[in-house]
Image (tube, grey):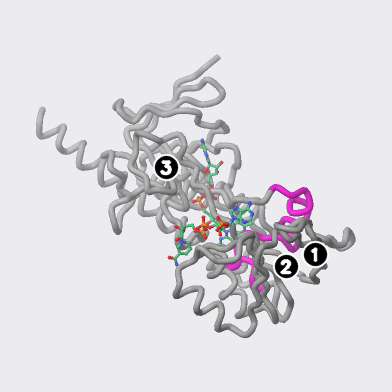
Amino acid sequence: MAEHHHSKVLILGSGPAGCTAAIYAARASLEPLMVHGLQPGGQLTITTDVENYPGFAAVIQGPWLMEQMEAQARHVGARIINDIITHCDLSKRPFECFGDSGDRYTGDTLVIATGAQARWLGLPSEQRFQGFGVSACATCDGFFYRGKEVLVVGGGNTAVEEALYLTNHASKVTVVHRRDHFRAEKILQERLFANPKITVIWDHMLDEVLGTDDPLGVTAVRLKQVKTGALRDLPVHGVFIAIGHTPNTALFKGQLEMDQEGYLTTRQGTTLTNVGGVFACGDVQDKIYRQAVTAAGTGCMAALDAEKYLAHHASAKVAAE
Ligand code: FAD
Ligand code: NAP
């Protein structure tokens, strides 16, 4: 039977941003409720080694880190529910959200931590080697390709920045782009063209990632000329897909301010959205840094902002009585 769950702080998403918001809100005695969504633990659950999250001298695994964050949130008293929110009404007070399960969720405040998803090409071989030579995050995985040759797919700012970043580790970086010019900012392009470690292959698409089963790993890529259809193989050890990200904000279209790409807009230096009592943290409002540690940082900010909002409204209510 459908249930109604109310909390002072309703948190959507259980990635680093949602978990950190839950930990801080629980420790502030706000009894938060966190809804997992389709990907409990968020994006880090689809990666392997994480080497840049502070506090761990040894290499840790993304899924393990997220288990720890969730366990910590539970330990300090957060309630966590498995459900996917299908729609929300932010014109109501308390805010109202509905789950795929049929359950109804209300919150005196709402913390949106629904993250973003890297866009993938959709190739079966791309999926097969994901986490084993195919990545969507150079900052996260570039280190593993020290002295090796890698490929970057894309022609926007992200692709160019990822390629430049990868030259810190890789011996050679090849960028493959489906057109004959980049859409990236000129200054970034100039830096890329000036870098002797980077080669660009124009008018080509990634057709297939080639590799071995045991151990699972990438050895080469097959590229296709978009005009002629001609195929060519290029030996590489790593493939970085950099064709953009999509923030998970469809739920809030028409209800919250977003930028042109659908990222939620927050007031600078805070997690405040344009609707009082609704806060956004993590990748759902960040198209620049997109790291677990920055998501956790803004998750903390969202809980503190929610606490402040509730305290202010509680004292305003007392004053009015
Ligand atoms: P996410 O982790 O994206 O979590 C979003 C959450 O929202 C999920 O729990 C999802 O289920 C939930 N959600 C979405 N829609 C709904 C809905 N309708 N209802 C309820 N819940 C919903 N960063 C690093 O710092 N170091 C790394 O090594 C690193 N490696 C990475 C490797 C890969 C392959 C990828 C893809 C990313 C990597 N990142 C890394 C980036 C990092 O994972 C993200 O920056 C971080 O996870 C963002 O956290 P978040 O909490 O904002 O969102
Ligand atoms: P983007 O600007 O949308 O670029 C995506 C790139 O991937 C484009 O070159 C596109 O090709 C290519 N692409 C898309 N789908 C593809 C497919 N199926 N196959 C092959 N190629 C494909 O995305 P982004 O680079 O991630 O940037 C997103 C936003 O963040 C932009 O507004 C960007 O300015 C901003 N950003 C800014 C900075 C910065 O300021 N330093 C850094 C990173 C990102 P086409 O060009 O042919 O369409």
Could you tell me if the residues under marks 1 and 2 are in contact, i.e. CB atoms within 8 Å?
Answer: yes
Instruction: Look at the numbered discs 3 and 2 and tell me whether their residues touch, using CB distance below 8 Å.
Output: no
Does the residue at mark 3 contact the one at mark 1 (Cβ under 8 Å)?
Answer: no
Highlighted magenta segment, given as a residue range: 122-143
Task: Using residue 227 as the reference point, say whether residue 180 is left or right of it.
Answer: left
Furthest toward the front, the residue is 228
Earlier-in-chain disc, 3 versus 2: 3
Mark number displayed over residue 112: 3
Is 275 located above or below residue 157 in the figure?
Answer: above
Number of residues whose C-alpha sits closer than 10 Å to that of mark 1, classed few (under 14), some (14–19) or many (20 or more): many
Mark closer to the chain start, 3 or 1: 3
Amino acid under label 3?
Answer: Ile
Q: Is mark 2 within 8 Å of ligand 1?
A: no
Tag on residue 320? none
* Residue annotated with mark 1: 218
* Number of callouts: 3
Q: Locate residue 197: give its quadrant.
A: bottom right
Q: Secondary structure at mark 2?
A: strand
Look at discs 3 and 2 and give the one toward the viewer: 2
Quick one: quadrant of the C terminus?
top left
Q: Position of residue 140 (x, y in %)?
A: 60, 66
Alpha carbon of mark 1 to alpha carbon of mark 2: how far?
6 Å
Q: Of the residues shown, which amino acid type is indicated by label 2?
A: Gly
Residue bearing mark 2: 238
